[in-house]
Image (cartoon, rainbow, N blue to C red):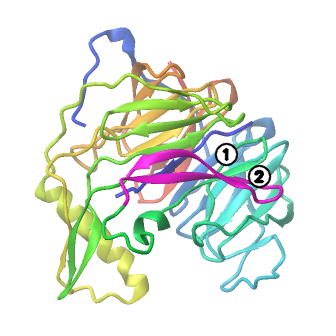
Amino acid sequence: MKSVFSLCAVALLGLAGCTRAESQSGLAHEATLPGGFGQLSNVVELDSGRVAFADTRDKLFFAATFATGKVDTLGTRREAVAPDAAPGEYKFPGWVAHLAGDTVALVDFSALRTTLWNEEGRPLRVLPIAPVAGTAPVLVYDTVGHGYKIDYQAMLEPEPGQTTRPDSIPVLRIKLDGGKVDTVARLATPEFGDAMFGEQKQQAATVFAPNDFFGVLANGTAWVARGRDNRVDWRAPDGSWSRGKSRKHTGQPVTQADKDRVLAQVREQGKQYGMPQDLPIQYPFAATKPPFDFALGRPNGEVWLQRPRARDDDALIYDVHSRGGEWQREVAFPTGASLAGFGENGAIYASVRKDDGTRTLSRYRLR
């Protein structure tokens, strides 16, 4: 499979209902893996019905076969990974991508390196990537020799003499062989506001404000989901752009329950950095939720936009936009399931919450 994944501009709908019954689609369940995992990353489809994914809570890398239910742990997790460590070692596997042929890339969020594996699960080597725009890892790849990275440093560290943030963020295309870098897209700068951590004030991205998302197809065709305009624009390999059609959106109000949930997540994440759990925290919040808060591309050229939910236990709904930039339909997922990846022949993979709080992986197809 030549996978298609998106890169979030800065993460953290009004329900624009469809008007025709034929514009609504559901999912038909095919198979579910046994056992439970902590928290699943994205999913990459391999050959013969196998998949690769990471458990970002237990920090392990897996390959699994749906036909047999067999799950294999790949490589070895280490508490520390030296710069010259073998490619089969990792500390925090956080993202998986498919490059050309049968090569799979595993992004280690802690060791700040990307290792290459074959589809059989054997580690090959460390992928050298030109050090541009800071140390944040490259998550998006095509199969014609490029990685893509959003230059957050352009936003966080303005050029000397600048007193305001830039009005756009460049998306850099990095040639894996040679390191040549160019800009292929620009994303809208996120909205910022004042956050308070105890008595310390700092700027933070406004939670629930609309953001842009970026992704590529296997051949290097790129797309940008525009959060403020609720549309998907496309960039052809020759550099020409086509503008998608905006879709009307009325935002859901951001409730106090939404704010409490986000702040609880901030506290939970802050534990690993020693943040006191009784520290007063204030964050900037938007008044209404955006049209989508996540985007993922499908190999056939569709882009699926995930609507925000009114409540945590609501089922997720995705708005599907075509390669031509037109809204096609909405797809409702089962309660507790969220989109994790796509495969060939219409396979749709979802991370599914189990009754015991763990998660597993299911494969579906559109009805």
Name the residue that disc number 2 marks.
Answer: 104
Quadrant that contains the N terminus? top right
Q: Secondary structure at mark 2?
A: strand
Type of amino acid at the residue the image marks with label 1: Val
Is 170 colored magenta in this rendering? yes
Name the residue that disc number 1 marks.
Answer: 44
Label 1, label 2: how many angstroms apart (C-alpha)? Answer: 8 Å
Disc 1 + disc 2, Cβ < 8 Å? yes
> Which percent across, then down, holds residue 291?
29, 37
First-in-chain label (1 vs 2)? 1
> Which percent across, then down, holds residue 284?
19, 64
> Which percent across, then down, holds residue 360?
54, 51
- In the image, residue 74 sits, relative to residue 172, either above or below, namely below
Question: Which residue occupies the foreground of this view, 140 or 233?
Answer: 233
Type of amino acid at the residue the image marks with label 2: Val
Which range is magenta? 166-188
Query: Horizontally, is 87 left or right of 301 in the view?
Result: right
- In the image, residue 204 sits, relative to residue 340, either above or below, namely below
Q: Residue at x 47, y 51 (%)?
A: 8
Principal secondary structure, stretch drawn in magenta: strand
Is 274 colored magenta in this rendering? no
